[in-house]
Image: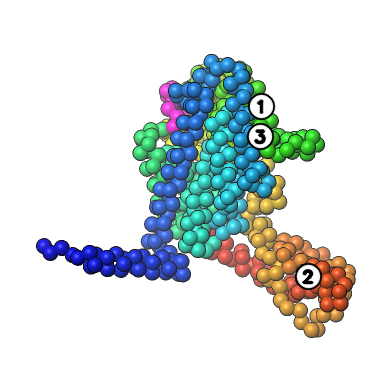
Amino acid sequence: MARQSPSVLAGHLVEVWARMKTARQSLVRRGPSQFQFWLIALVIGVLAGFAALAFRTGIATLQGWVYGADDVDLLHSFAATLPWYILLLVPVLGGLVVGLILHRFTEDARVRSVADVIEGAALREGRVELRQGMASAVASFLTLSTGGSSGREGPVVHLAGMISTWVSEKIRADGISGRDLLGCAVAAAVSASFNAPIAGALFAMEVVLRHFSVNTFAPIVVASVAGTVINRLQYGDVTEFVLNTPGALQFYVELPAFLLLGLICGLVAGLLMHSIFLADRLATWVQTTLHVPRWLRPAVAGFLLGLIAIWFPHIIGVGYETTVLALSGQLLLGQAIIFALVKAAAVSVTMGGRMGGGVFSPSLMVGALTGLAFGLIATAILPDVSGTHTLYAFAGMGAVAAAVLGAPISTTLIVFELTGDWQIGLAVMVSVSMSTALASRLVDRSFFLTQLERRNLRCAAGPQSYLLGTLLVGKVMRPLAAEEEEAAAELVADGIVLSHDATLEAALPMFDREDLDFVPVVAQSDAVENDAPGPQIVGVLRHLDALKAYNSALVAVSAEEHR
């Protein structure tokens, strides 16, 4: 067979490159086709899966090096043998580095996490912050490696959101495509973190996108499966937690106990969330009152964590070892109660100190300890009609986590996939439903949505609440007509005006309050033509135009959710 000359091969390469360039231009100009979108979802799933794997492996490596532990899964037992000054100094030094990183690379010294991903899906066309997100990922990585008491899932979710944001920017994805790609990345990250493909897909839609769509489901599943494959290539097809004590559920007799457990877990979840918010407010007050530099705040939190770890080393990191002990029933009643209280305090110190990390793993641990304590009491009171107390630890783990996340469906499935035990699904569902129903009334639906509410981002009530805050007056206003000039001037004189960068959230109540057909829109200027400072009218916002813009936004959201 004749060989092709180098010039012919070069010609083929040039042709291939030209076609790839044309395909990319077409992708950017017209948006991806369904096949292209699924392919992009697969790529994002692989990248997010590797990011989650690298984050988890990196934490284990650095944690083992810092504490000198051979097996970080048994870190708590090993830490109990370390000198007290090691347990005290490691989180202080880690907090100091975290504080310097956040001070340098974020404007508010705050770690980005799941709440910011939800905000990106709702308000930013599926985009999240990149520079601040990278700093947050490093800060969370150091926090979890140096004694911080939080979880790795929140940072991993935001890290995945950064990957999808980068891809969305490259292909200039619109809002719908950007949100879908964000959901794909989140699903892959959760799946890779927990080896839970079903729960990962549902978590992305239930928690981040906050709606279910048939067309969205397929690419999210593709990405979720890709993330799971990445996990299994490293860890194999094994469950995160192995239950050594099987048990049977006396369905009709024992179900009321799981209803009661769900209510107790709802209260525990509510207290856990409020303790975190209280710690944040208290730390902010102390920082402001004592004029503590913001970069020093995580180090102070690290010092408090170090003091706690001297007596309770089980608070270090995600708490895997203690959670396993609770699920296998190897703790006493007093230990379960004390460990749950101390862990909740440690999580509050970590989050209030702005150190980094998430709340999912801590909520699993607190839930397992709560369920175990309840189970030990219940089985002691009615031993003849009760299953083993580890079943209550299993249900409590899901109940507290679901209430904190505000995600009863995906959390229930995560717990199933973490343990591989499907025999007590009814008990878990009952406990989760009761805890979520109660806790959602103690906060704004969930921990993440409450975080957004505290920033005046009203995502908890749905699009009808937060969409007004996304519509700018300057985009809806019209030019000032000649016949409206006199009336507009009178309204300006009375102080009834809107800024061109205000939102319809401020505008619509003004129409109702003043009973007006239009409101002048002004741009503050240092001087106008007569050199007198004052507001300059740049247009008018009509009540009907504002209502039409709001209605169009609602229709667009509804079409996206039902497409």
Q: Is residue 385 above or below residue 452?
A: above
Q: Is residue 457 magenta?
A: no
Q: Residue at x 79, y 67 (%)?
A: 524
Q: Amino acid at mark 3?
A: Pro
- Over which residues does the magenta segment extend? 240-249
Most common secondary structure along the magenta stretch: loop
Q: Is residue 75 left or right of residue 312?
A: left
Percent coordinates x, y for residue 173 in the rendering? 50, 62
Q: Give the vertical position of 536 relative to 424 (above or below).
A: below
User: Is 242 within the magenta?
Assistant: yes
Residue 282's disc number: none
Residue extending farthest to the front is 6
Could you tell whether 546 is left or right of 151 in the image?
A: right
The residue that mark 3 highlights is 298
Residue at left 70%, top 37%?
A: 280
* Image x and y of residue 382, in percent: 55, 19
Q: Which residue is mark 2?
A: 522
Between tags 3 and 2, which lies in front? 3
| Mark 1 lies on residue | 303
Mark positioned earlier in the residue sequence (1 or 3): 3
